[in-house]
Structure formats: structure tokens, C-alpha cells
Image (spheres, rainbow, N blue to C red):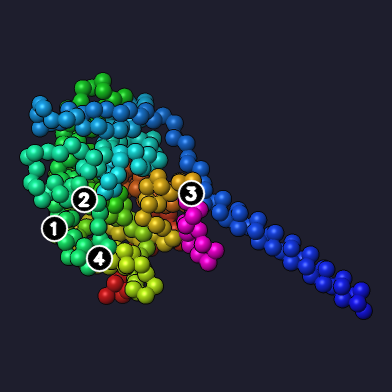
Amino acid sequence: MRGHAGFIARTAVALGVVAGLAVFAALLREMASLRADRPPEPPGVVTRDLSLRDPRGMGRPAIAVKVWAPQDATKPCPMIVYVPSWGGRRDENQVMLAELAHNGFIVAAADDVSHDPPDPAVDAADEAVRKAPFRAFSAEDLAAFPDVSARRTKLGFEKLDRVVEALMRLPADALPATIDASRIGVVGFSFGGAVAATALARDPRIAAAINLDGWLIHTAAAPGVSRPLLALYAMPDFNPRRFWTSTANFFVTKLTLEDLRAALSLQRTSQIEVFLIAGVQHGDFSDAVYSADRWRRWRPWRTDVIRSERMREIVTAFVTPFLQQHVAGRATLGQRPSFIEVAPLEAFEARLQ
């Protein structure tokens, strides 16, 4: 009997070890899947770094931009201007921008206004906002946000306007393709999304815009826009609790929910499409989704962390056809594919009450 019991015990231990190793291997595979490789740049795309002459006149510093363009375009190409996040750089979303160039757009991106040299002509309050970090982490921050947003999106739009004007003045041989000045769109991430919406409201040259997890409230777009706007947001916590949520996340989420309520209202009067994506963090709308240390956000109890290749698939399916239709004027084939992670904002109307 003792020998039989010992055999059973040894067998149980062995099976436990095998099961443990299997679980450990599965966890390693799960962690490795969050470290997806950055995709290669698509073929037929030329990248150039340019210094644009500021259209405001001599003595102004040049505006540094990065441009992605189709290599073998036979006719003028529609142009997309990308606006980065608060404090962001022009190369923060290269994968998406190169993909747009591959699909026939000339794409240009400049740094956030915080990286520009001081301008003596700028109002002192505007200058303070331009240099300050983003803050929406307390009740005081939220109280100040309407003024901060209005001032900073104004500065972002003014820079965007200068970039567009300078690109239009480029000599014909500056790029491998010619810009179609009648077809211009704007794409922005985070703060850049707020600027993209602002540009759509203020500049009649802009045919359409895309807001990637930015905001609409306290911008020139808040009263509404008359041309197409697509907004993609990370799915928020619809019921944040101070006990479970960090103070910073609690107030950022409050701001997000306020913005989504405004967007829901605007959908009734404006050409706005808004979608929420589950399993997404803010940085996943940029090249941060390909970061090598992205596995650090993994938790065994969370099953909804989106993979980088899935995020790229979703963003491409929404962004590219929208710009092809509303900026390039091309007919899109078939319906937009559905994704289990993506839902329209109106599906959450009851939760936003």
C-alpha cells in the first residue's frame, strides 16, 4: 500500500510539474505576443526630411517636416497633414503615415508646438500654455482645461496652417509627386486630434479630418463641423471610482466622458462618426504600440489587451478608406469590416447619461 501511495504521489507531482511548465510556456508566448515586431515600411514610398520656409516672412525659423510620398505617382496626389500629440514629434506615427503614402497620399508631419522656438509676438498666456505639460489630473486641472484647450488648439492650428501654406509653395522638384491642393485632409493623435477637428472647423481647405483619441470639447469644433470627421477613442471606464482608480486616471476619465457626451450630441447635427475600441490604451494609436517593452502592461487576469497587429488592422480599416473617400474622392469598395473590439459611440448612449 505504501508503494502504491508513493507512486500516486510521485505521479501527481510529475503531472503538476508538467502542467506548471505548460502554463509557464503559455505565459511566455502571451508575453512574447505583446512584443510584436514593427512592420516594414511598405514598398513604393519615399521619405524626405524638409525645412520649410515660414510663410510669415523672412527672419522666421524654418519649419522642420517629414514627408512620405508615393514614388511613382503619375498625377497630383491628395495631401494629409499629421499633427502629433502634446509634446510629440513628427515621427511618432510613422507606420500609419507610410501606409497612407503607399495608398496614394502625400503625407507631411511637423513637431508639436512645444518644440518650436519662442515667438515674441505670441501672447504671454498662450506662450505659457505652449510650454506647459498636459494636465488633466485634478479638479483644478479640469477647471482650467477649457481655457488651456482653446489656447493650445489655436496655437496648434496656426502652425498647421503655416505648414499647409509652406507645402503649397514648394518647388515642383522638392517631392517625388505633386500635391493636389484641392484635396487636403488632417489626421491627429491625442492633442493633434483636437487640432485636426479645429482645422476642419476653421479652414475651408480641409476636406475631412481624423481625431485619434483626442478631444472635441473646448475647441473650435465644439459647436459642430460641416465636413466629415472620424474619431476613434480608447474604450473608457464608464463608471470610474476613486477607490479603485488612481487620482490621475480618475480625472482624465471624467474629461473623456464629458468629451464623449459632447461628441454624441454633435453626431445629431454634424458629419461625425465616433467609435470606441476595447482593449486599447492611449499610446496604442501611435507607434508606441510596437514598443519592445509593451509586455509590461500585460496582466494574467486581463484578456482584452489588444495586440499591435490587431490594432494596426483596425486603424487601417477605418483611416484609409475614410481618407480615400472624403479627401481623395475615390469610391470605396464594400462595407467597412466589423471588429468585435469596435463599437459606435451611440451604442453607449445609456451609459453616458
In the rendered image, which residue does mark 3 sit on?
A: 293
Residue under pointer 2:
132
Mark carried by residue 147? 1
> Is residue 16 left or right of 205 when viewed as pictured?
right
How far apart are the two marked residues, 4 and 1, measured between alpha carbons?
A: 15 Å
Q: Looking at the picture, does residue 305 appear above or below residue 12?
A: above
Q: CA distance from mark 4 to mark 3?
A: 29 Å
Residue type of the residue flagged with mark 2: Ala
Q: Main secondary structure of the magenta part?
A: loop
Q: Mark 3 near mark 2, Cβ–Cβ under 8 Å?
A: no
Q: Which residues are magenta?
A: 293-308
For image coordinates 28% across by 37% down, the residue present is: 109
- Label 4 – label 2 distance at C-alpha: 16 Å
Q: Residue furthest top?
A: 173
Q: Circle 4 sits on which residue?
A: 138
Marks 2 and 1, the one that precedes in the sequence: 2
Dot 4 or dot 3, earlier in sequence: 4
| Residue 238 spot, x, y in % from top left | 34, 71
